[in-house]
Amino acid sequence: MEYVVAAVILLVVLVAGVVGLVVPRMRRRELPPPGSAPTTTIERPPADETEAPELIVPAEADELPPLIAEPPVIEEPVAEKPALEQPEPTAGRLVRLRARLARSQSALGRGLLSVLSRDHLDDDAWEEIEESLISADVGVEATQVIVARLRERVRVLGTRTVAEVRQQLAEELTAALEPDLDRSLKTAPHDGRPAVVLVVGVNGAGKTTTCGKIGRVLIADGRTVLFGAADTFRAAAADQLQTWGERVGAETVRGPEGGDPASVAFDAVKRGIDTGVDTVLIDTAGRLQNKVGLMDELGKVKRVVEKHGPVDETLLILDATTGQNGLEQARVFTEVVDVTGVVLTKLDGTAKGGIVIAVQRKLGIPVKLVGLGEGPDDLAPFEPAAFVEALLGSDS
């Protein structure tokens, strides 16, 4: 009996030992929770502490997940091009801007009409009329001719009403402006190349701004334009001209600051030929007429440009407020580059409208455009009859 008890105890001890060895190992493999996917352990050889931990990948996965997430794709914002400006038509623009001549009107037109409407015009009255015209920069010679003709008409016709005298004065002033002169701008392409317009003038006349406005005038009339920034002495001038071009979609050719102006002008015309534009406008540096070297350089610009063909227009920008001094400027420029037309700026708010008559009578050069304000479209083709009407104002 004792042997049987000993055998049972020994059996129990053996079973307990086996269970103690097996159960801990079974605990190492825990069953996954219900419904979870089975996993596969990727065994790796022992490594040091710096090695990345082993990866546990779902057994059903075809590919390993990326270790590093790809950066999000950032779309560059598309810069919207500014809307191009559409210059207003030039037809009738001078009539629309007649209010800009209000000060000239009161100083010249109404002053003259008040004298001419007197019951008796003696010598003192006619002298007063002469002084009014001279003070308006009509010029001495032109004034004497106008007054003599008007005095004769009043004497012969015996007119006295304000309306009649006003009409006679308007006719004489219009005649002094030589309405038969050709005031058209030669801006049409020809011979397989664009028309070339050279813009010249002294410092401070508003030349670069007016060059930009001329471009708008041409675009308003249906031309395509390219600017040449040949004023290389002022970087601001090239920047300013380029801004004018960008507003209306016109290209600007420019060179390095202090570069050769003639080279820039040459490249601008070449670019105009390559792109097939109608007109190339070349802005030159503002020059004092008494600087011989600078004037010679301006002549060089024209000669270099003419390697592509003749210059079609050379427009002189004159500040109307400079009065008779502008005539000397015009004379010197004409000798150097053969000016074909005058653009009078700053006629708004001035009593110097008569300078138009003086320029044409003294130089025989037609005034083709007049500036009557600071707005981008305040440059108008010059029309003698409309200009005189604006100067004289209402006859009431």
Image (tube, rainbow, N blue to C red):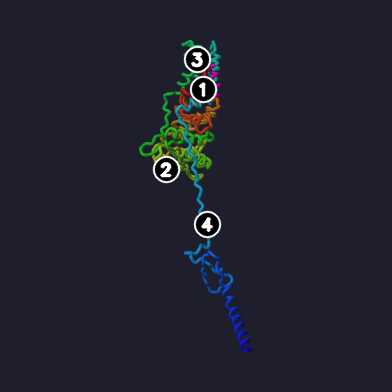
Which of the two discs, 3 and 4, sits closer to the camera? 4
| Residues rendered magenta in the picture | 100-113
Q: Position of residue 112 (x, y in %)?
A: 53, 18
Q: Position of residue 344 (x, y in %)?
A: 50, 30
Q: Would you call the spot at circle 3 few (<14 residues within 10 Å), some (14-19), or many (20 or more)?
A: some
Relative depth, front residue between 347 and 225 = 225
Please name the residue shown 47% across and 14% down the image: 153
Numbered tag placed on residue 163 in the rendering:
3
Of the residues shown, which amino acid type is indicated by label 4? Pro
- Do we see residue 325 in this rendering? no
Q: Earlier in the sequence, mark 4 or mark 2?
A: 4
* Quadrant the N terminus occupies: bottom right
Q: CA distance from mark 1 to mark 2?
A: 42 Å
Task: List the single residue furthest toward the right.
Answer: 2
Q: Which residue is mark 2?
A: 271
Cβ–Cβ under 8 Å for marks 3 and 2: no
Membership of 161 in magenta stretch = no
Of the residues shown, which amino acid type is indicated by label 2? Arg
108 left or right of 222? right
Q: Which residue is mark 1?
A: 391
Q: Earlier in the sequence, mark 1 or mark 2?
A: 2
Numbered tag placed on residue 351 in the rendering:
none
Image: 49 above or below 201? below
Of the residues shown, which amino acid type is indicated by label 1? Leu
Q: Earlier in the sequence, mark 1 or mark 4?
A: 4
Please name the residue shown 42% across and 37% down the image: 224
Which of the two discs, 3 and 2, sits closer to the camera? 3
